[in-house]
Amino acid sequence: MPKELIPLLIPVIVIQLSLQIVAIINVSKKTNEQVRFENKLIWLLIIIFGSLLGAIAYFIFGGNPNVNDSSED
């Protein structure tokens, strides 16, 4: 790998790891009913093995739109 590419890859790696960590924390705080398809393990595997795209897919498709997360009544 050319040494000129390393400074360009560092921000991508930081963004990827940050998104993955935030997604894993988000999944772990929710119950099975609050996650689409009601299976947290599957979403964790998608986030971990799908790397950047897995974390993005979780944030787009992972939340269950039928469950209201806000506590406003």
Image (cartoon, rainbow, N blue to C red):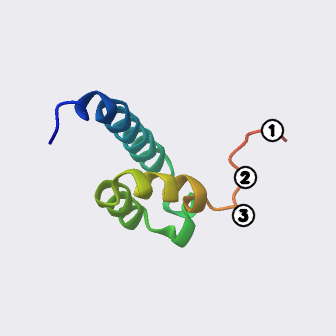
Task: Say which residue appears at 33% left-offset and 32% top-offset.
Answer: 8
Q: CA distance from mark 3 to mark 1?
A: 15 Å
Q: Which residue is mark 1?
A: 72
Q: Is residue 31 visible?
A: no
The local crowd at label 1, few if under 14, some if 14 to 19, many if 20 or more residues have their Cα within 10 Å, is few
Q: Quadrant of the N terminus?
A: top left
For the residue marked with disc 2, what is the amino acid?
Asn
In the foreground, 72 or 55? 55
Task: Say which residue appears at 44% left-offset and 46% top-offset.
Answer: 23
Q: Is residue 68 visible?
A: yes
> In the rendering, at what x and y percent does residue 28 appear?
41, 47
Q: Which residue is mark 2?
A: 68
For the residue marked with disc 3, what is the amino acid?
Asn
Residue 66: assigned label: 3
Query: Most extreme residue toward the top, as rendered?
Result: 7
Q: Secondary structure at mark 2?
A: loop
Task: Say which residue appears at 72% left-offset and 52% top-offset.
Answer: 68
Say above or below: 67 vs 5: below
Q: Secondary structure at mark 1?
A: loop
Q: Quadrant of residue 49?
A: bottom left
Q: Nearer the viewer, mark 3 or mark 1?
A: 3
Query: Most extreme residue toward the right, as rendered?
Result: 73
Residue 42: assigned label: none
> In the rendering, at what x and y percent does residue 24 appear?
39, 46
Residue 12 placement, left or right of 62 = left
Q: Secondary structure at mark 3?
A: loop
In the foreground, 48 or 27? 48
> In the rendering, at what x and y percent does residue 38 appear?
51, 69
